[in-house]
Image (cartoon, grey):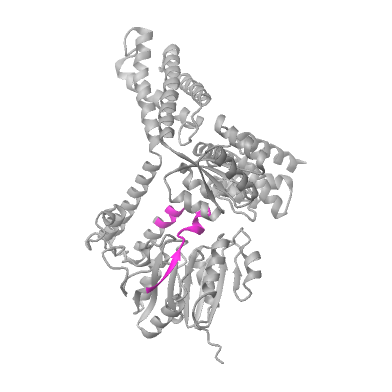
Amino acid sequence: MSNIINISIVIVNYNVKDFLRNCLDSIYNSDTNLIFEIIVVDNNSHDDSFEELSKLYKDVKFILLKENLGFSKANNIGFAEASGEFVLILNPDTILSADTLHKVYHFMKSNPEIGASGCKVLNHDNTFQLPCRRSFPTPWNSFCKLFGLQKIFPNTKLFSEYNLTYKSIDESYEVDALIGAFMFVRNDVIDKINGFDEEYFMYGEDLDFCYKVKKAGYKVYYFHETSIIHFKGESTKRSNINEVKHFYDAMQIFVKKHYSSSFLFLTFLKTGIKVRELLSYLIKFRRDILFITIDILLVLILFPIANKLRYGYSVGYPAENYDIYSIVLVFFALIAQFLSGNYFERDYRFRKNIVSGLMMMMGVGFFIYLIRGFDLSRIVLFITTTSFITLSYLIRSFISSRANSKSKFTNLIVGNNELSEKIVEYFKINKIPYSTISNENDLFNVVKNSNSQYEILVCDNSDILDLKHNLKEYQENINSLIQINDYQDFIFKFSISKTLNSDIIFKKSDLDLLRVKFIKRILDIFVSLLLLSVALLFLLFKKASIKNIFQVLIGKKTLIGIYKGKKHFNYKEGLYSLVALNSTSLENDIDELNKYYINNYSLTLDFDIFVKSFFKKKG
């Protein structure tokens, strides 16, 4: 009896326990007599993947990493343990067909000139995933991909060379590159090319890998006779990784590495990526850009009106200085609106405009006090400011109400238990439209692939904070996200959310707000510069402390933040934290204290932690 392993299957897992389980089941259900081994490299998941799945799959070799090293490094660690003739690089969010292993193995055995092959990769709805067979980027096909010409002319070779959309998906042929979710590779080829380039954290590494395979003298093939299902991007959705940023960075690394001699191509790609990135942000924040534009116009219109009311003519100051007064008023109006939360937040309450008006008047007043010769009438300032905040609020309310009236909200019940059945019955009796989702995994797919607006009722034991973080990319599709503990809890929360529009509404933690990040960064810079100055003058701090303060200054850490525990939320580690203040080392306590800090964040809480930590050290 031979002990030769035909296929080593290497899977890198990160927080997709349920998907990984389905993937492993599909492997074990394969219709083949081939001998295979499965190596799962876990990138420090915090969803108990190893604890639960290692008990169910005794034959799987689990390699646990202490931190998320990214796709490339983790795969290379798996390759070092692989002893098969072939290595299947497989994503955990995939499901193999029963014949996949058998067919691809024999295809590769029959074609020794092929170093790597991929198969037909389908979405969960059986539509074809374009990245499973690609060309290497060139100036022209990159342009067509970045600016949508490929979508407009999918069947024309001239415009669709990058994703080969002009070619049939039901034929096998040589290609430049495959998708990292499924690559069937000769083990000796992996050795020759030294595996994945670890400069890539995520995205682009499959492109680079295939480039090296072809450079080593082998062919890369798309094989159409079998297929897999790929639930694209599941690991990314369950992390706080910036998917877009990593994709763009990966493309730049690839071009710089393999097309370094082409300065024009590198410049073109960088410019195209930046333009595309800018366009995506403009689209995402189009309503805020509209509000900023409206606010600028309001100030420029209201300022001369205020002058007219005060002096009887529009320009109440020397004409040569009028533009300066207008610019100063616009500047402080925008700063006040930003700091009060009237930009980049979907919460337009009048009290925010009152705060904004006070900040605007104080800012201009302070400027008048500091700058000699700047003599702005207090009455003009008051009229301009009060009319500005009133009209700004009314315009925001009108635009928001119009947008909301066009949105049809769907009640989405998450869970499959007695509580969810009672809520379904309530909706039926009261003739309220609803849909049901059995688990968290289905929820991501529904929200991601829909343009509807949802009122989400979570009836199972899902971690609501994790859900908020994982769904925040799609928060424009979510009106509310409510955790329901029992039926009475549902009656109360559902009624309150409908009538008061209270803080049950899905919203970011204040730590996610742009204005809060800005304020924290300014405070970090100011305090760290102050502490470093004191350290240099009086040599009060140890070397380790100075290093930490310097990390705050350059933005790697923050003065007050979370403590790096088992769950790595996408927030900066703080020199001071609730965890350090409570002197606990228990993982559950660390997670709960971090959650409390994120959910209840305010500048007052930061100040409280700082003061108590300071006096604790003194004591």
Q: Is residue 366 above or below residue 38?
A: above
Q: Quadrant of residue 424?
A: top right
Outermost residue toward the right in this view: 619
Q: Is residue 302 above or below residue 459?
A: above
Q: Is residue 246 magenta?
A: yes
Q: Quadrant of the C terminus?
A: top right
Percent x, y of residue 222: 35, 72
Q: Is residue 603 left or right of residue 613?
A: left
Q: Is residue 457 above or below residue 174?
A: above
Percent x, y of residue 140: 25, 59
- Taking the image as drawn, is residue 55 in sight? yes
Q: Which residues are magenta?
A: 225-247
Q: Is residue 38 above or below residue 555?
A: below
Residue occupying the point 36% across, 45% down: 278
Percent x, y of residue 223: 36, 74
Residue occupying the point 53% across, 36% down: 519
Q: Is residue 533 left or right of residue 130?
A: right
Residue occupying the point 35% across, 83% down: 113
Q: Is residue 549 left or right of residue 348?
A: right
Given residues 537 and 602, the one toward you in this image is 602
Q: Quadrant of the N terminus?
A: bottom right
